[in-house]
Image: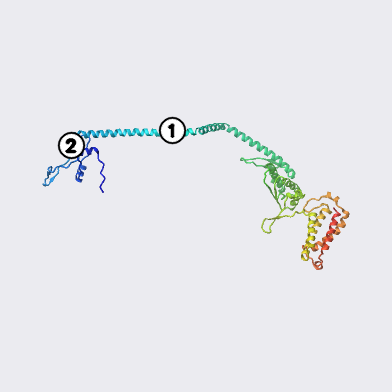
Amino acid sequence: RRKRPRARDPLRRATDMVGRGSRPRRRRSSRRAAAASQPPPDRGGWLAIPPSRPSAGRMAATSGGSPQRDNWPHPRPRSAVEPGVGRAATEIEENIRKLDKETSALETQYNEAVRRLANLQARAQLSRQIGDVTDLIAGLKWVHRASQLVGRFAGILRSLSRATTDASTEIINSQFRQVFEEERTLLRAPEVEVAFPGTGGKAARKKQIVKRKPSEILSEGEQRVIALADFLAEVRVRAPKGPVVFDDPVTSLDYRRLDQVADRLAALAKTHQVIVFTHDIMLVAELLERFSSSAERSRCTFYAVTREDAPGYVTSGRHPRWDTAGTLRSKIDEQIRAAEQSSGEDREKAIRDAYSLIRSWLEVVVERDLFKCVTERYRPQVTLGSLASIKIAELEAARTVILRIFKRCCRVTPAHSQAGHHSFAFPALEDLKEDWDAALEMRAAHK
């Protein structure tokens, strides 16, 4: 490949043309090396003229006899260069400086035009959104002014908030004292003094008896009834909507307060869902007694917790006193109809079940019809006022019928193991109907 010619200085090219004629010639490599060894041209006083090919006659002899070229080119003064070349170089340099100035001016004008264009575009954008900008500025001014006003009233607001909190706390505490005193009286709890020494922003209640702790004076049962009164008072004051759970509320309490506790729980059940866990069968009987009427019975459900299949297994429980003579009579009549419609072992099973129910029916009749509920199972007190309602004249006849039927029930029921000839003396269906008619007739005389 041919090498690309290098750009050359116009002034030097002109001098080459002057020294070698109108036709520029190509230098040899030896002449390039000789020119490179010469010092750079001094534009002040002397001008180095590139060498032109010397004539064949200009040769010099060396001491060895071989011809040698003399040192060429010799520097010539600027005055030796033709005047047209210098003027052309000067004009070229002047033109270059003018072009630089014009370029700088045009660049400045371009930058100014770009800036003005950006300003005009921003103004056009602002003119389209001037309404939103005005509203935003007005809103920011309002916020700034409101912030200044809030800062002025911050102290007043804190004072009002503190005063409101204190007033609310005082009202709640005063109301709690009143409600607690009512609950304490209803539960027949000892009299105590209630204080509210709240610390650290937290509410707290403190109870004292002659400036001493209740645990230092009262028994465990009395402390428990005070705690129950406190809990009931808090439920009434705060009025939560969720269920209220009690865990053995009558533990360590005497039976004199059992009725009061049952009354309070039944009253609370009118406004809340009440769940009571207890081991006390007497409390269960008293609570269920409050819902024994037909209108209230659906509002109370009794469950028994056993360990038959797993710990905490819950089954539907049986009311200790909800087996009335009426409910048991319907079950007995059902077993008699089943015996009439069956035979063999099925009839024998129906007769056994009927006599078992008749035994329970006799117990209820004796308790409620003969003795008029003077004493009842799972009830601590004796109702002496009901003695006047007992029909003493008919008791002997009733006793005879009850003992005869009760003896047959004990022989038939699977709960007793019979020996000897009694195991073969199984009553027939007619015997069952005869005993049941005699029992109904006996009860009718005492209703």
Q: Position of residue 394 (x, y in %)?
A: 88, 55
Residue type at mark 1 is: Leu
Left or right of 147 in this view: 222 = right
Labels 2 & 1 near each other (Cβ < 8 A) = no
Residue 120 disc label: 1
| Residue 270 in the image: above or below residue 77 | below
Left or right of 108 in this view: 51 = left
Between 85 and 312, the one lying in front of the other is 85
Left or right of 3 in this view: 304 = right
Is there any visible trace of residue 44 in the rendered image?
Answer: no
Between 36 and 318, the one lying in front of the other is 36
The mark nearer the N terminus, 2 or 1, is: 2
User: Looking at the image, which residue sits at the far right?
Assistant: 393
Between 131 and 442, the one lying in front of the other is 131
SS class, disc 1: helix
Q: Position of residue 302 (x, y in %)?
A: 72, 52
Left or right of 367 in this view: 85 = left
Q: Which residue is mark 2?
A: 76
Q: Position of residue 254 (x, y in %)?
A: 75, 49
Whole-angstrom CA distance, mark 2 to mark 1, is: 63 Å
The residue lying at 22 percent from left, 39 percent from top is: 13
